[in-house]
Image: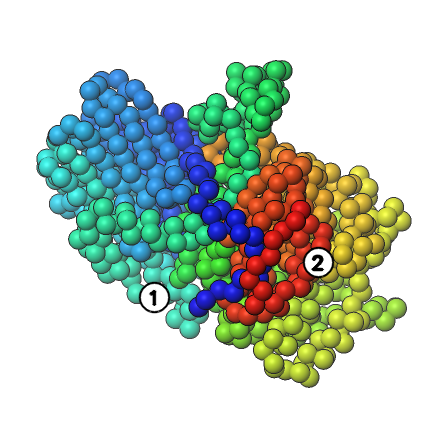
Amino acid sequence: MKKHTLGFSILLASVASAFAADLTLFYDKPAKDWETEALPIGNGRLGAMIFGGVEREQIQFNEDSLWTGDETDTGSYQTFGDLFIEFDSKGSTTGYRRALDIGRAVHTITYTQGEVNFRREYFASHPANVMAFRFTADKPGALTGSIALADAHKAVTSAERNRLTAKGNLDGYTYPSAGPNANYTIDLNYEAQVLVLNDGGTVEAKDGKIFFKNANALTILLAAGTDYSNQRSQKWRGPHPHEAVTERLAKASATPYAELLAAHEKDYQSLFNRLTLDLGKTSEALLQLPTNRRLAAYRGGDQAVAKGISYDGQTNTSQGKRAPDPELEVLIFQFARYLMISCSRPGDLPANLQGIWNNRNDPPWRSDYHANINIQMNYWFVDAANLGECFEPYSEWLNSIVAVRREDTKRSFGVRGWATRWENGIFGGATARWSMGDGAWLAQNLWDHYAFTGDKEYLRTRAYPILKELCEFWEDILKENADGKLIAPPGTSPEHGPVAAGNSYDQQLAYDLFTNTIEASQALGVDEDFRKKVETIRARLLGPKIGKWGQLQEWVEDIDDPKDQHRHFSHMIAVHPGRQISPSTTPELAEAAKVSMNARGDESTGWSRAWKICVWARLQDGNRAYKILNGMVKSSFLPNLFATHPPFQIDGNFGYAAGVCEMLLQSHTGEIQLLPALSQAWQNGKATGLMARGNCTVDIEWKDGKVVNYHITSPEPREVKFRVNGQLKTMNSEVLKEQITP
């Protein structure tokens, strides 16, 4: 379908071609630690962490449906196993480099040993649903060693000819910290296969391993799966994975390696290349540093680098002064997009607390779907960052568990609709504390996806039924207070404070749910009577309150502590990701939100810092948002650029990306705002492929903090309100050109 141009300058057509950012993480040593140093690859379903050892390579891998649990217990995401490749190394090693090119989604390792130059390539193919590892050398017959497959549970492992197999069942294994209801039979079948293809030399199976000798090149293909099904009607089980895994390897092995790689890159780049970002240039001296040292220089901790770095005509002369590195800020943003593409693709499960990467059977917080902010944060940025397809696993998972949650809710509370607890798994089971607002928060993401895409079929079949049912739940649980206002039953403001009725967390999420449901009903042209009832309930909701020290109250009672700096600030949901409070529509409440956020402070854990960036961006204070972003880069990213809570939690990566998007473009108030929260640190820059609600694609170029070029397109003719350089404009898509005068 032809896109309609809403407004642009004549220079924007060539903006995309002007980007030449180096989007590579690289290191001069092998990884020793899984969490901080190994590098991730993934195709949505399969994930792996690459260590890059010279004598001994370790590839730890996962499959997204390898979980314990059932309909009564969350269970836990499990590690699958490891692939170990031993090399008969000869001579000292020089010129070692391991790198992850997130522009291609390819991990490479190069080094010289003796007089032989070795090269490795690793990628996870979504089209083929396999992982591929390629080993080459510039001298014939240089590859000799062995390959072993290690299972993380009790699988039967075998080696035959050029194939390694691990086949097992999780029955008998439970999460060490499982709740009192975790007395269940898991009975989940799983299987992994590894196929070894040699160019020259020999390959044989012996003693449970594959031995290769004097090969010119080696290609290793890995496929894995379980019999999990997201259909409750099938009791969460499908066919045994053996046939599917075998077929994937057969097809992949019949495809020339170059074609396998080309298909992978084409598929990945069809998503990744939609968005480009330039926030300024980094010194060549910094760009030449391994990523871990570059991050240290950003923090001011790499003294040898920080001293004397030249940037934009200015030189840092004092040791310990932070070396400016806007391209690192962009790299972290694009790394988040890489991670999302790598761990959340249609047909797979959504990203959990660690995305798809996990090396433990008892991971922190079960590596689950935490519903009091974490899984929601994972998906805040996907539509804004032009990765809408990656949202599908979230929608499919939520729809798959609703029936279980409905029954659990009815047993516990005797009401219609459904609610959930903090911890959620893949079989509908949930554990830990009940939280009334969590279901509404999960549904908020569903509405936002529609707001960006305008996909009415998705709204009708996926989002609206859940929104409507949740409204019924809230209609049943809301109680009238002495003033005649409707308030939520006693609950917490995650994860602190008193148990009290009508806390802001619940009230704001209920308001947001009702608003989204009303607009969904209008968009679909259905349920007019139900809509009017919801409108009436919303009008009676107890709304946000301003307290005695000018703060936005977290609870009904004015008990907020100005010294409280808890990592959760759940009374800000109305600011972000909700839309009840904004500087343009509710200025007094927005000022009260600032008072609360000032009291909370700028320091926090990883995901909390990311949310603060988003909130301050929505409050249109770009310098404050950047200050927190700067602090997050300094304190909340590990050497491999994983975000840390601590420990590693991927919501920090994704929340950071959401914050950057909010600083550059907002559209939640009914108008598209270009650069609503631009920092002085980013006074010159370009962005292409940002998305605004209403299915609008936005390109922006700015100089000295002012937009100089913009380009807005939409698939269908429509009227759009947008704000550029403080001026509100309304344009019809038939207007093709406009010259910007800053």
Whole-percent x and y of residue 721? 66, 63
Which label lies toward us, 1 or 2?
A: 2
Which residue is at a point 38% across and 25% down the rendered structure image?
29
| Residue topped by disc 2 | 728
| Residue sitting at x 38%, y 47% | 42
Judging depth in this view, the residue of 293 and 495 nearest the camera is: 293
Name the disc covering residue 238, or none. Answer: 1
Image quarter hosting the N terminus:
bottom left
* Horizontal side of residue 371 vs 593, given as left or right: left
SS for tag 1?
loop
Q: Amino acid at mark 1?
A: Gly
Image position of 553 with respect to 732: above or below: above
In this view of the protein, can residue 558 be seen by the observer? yes
Q: Secondary structure at mark 2?
A: strand
Q: Is residue 561 left or right of residue 370?
A: right
Pick out the residue farthest to the bottom.
529
Q: Position of residue 673 (x, y in %)?
A: 66, 54
> Relative to the observer, which residue lies in front, 600 or 722?
722
The amino acid on which the numbered mark 2 sits, given as a three-letter code, is Leu
Q: Position of residue 254 (x, y in %)?
A: 17, 53
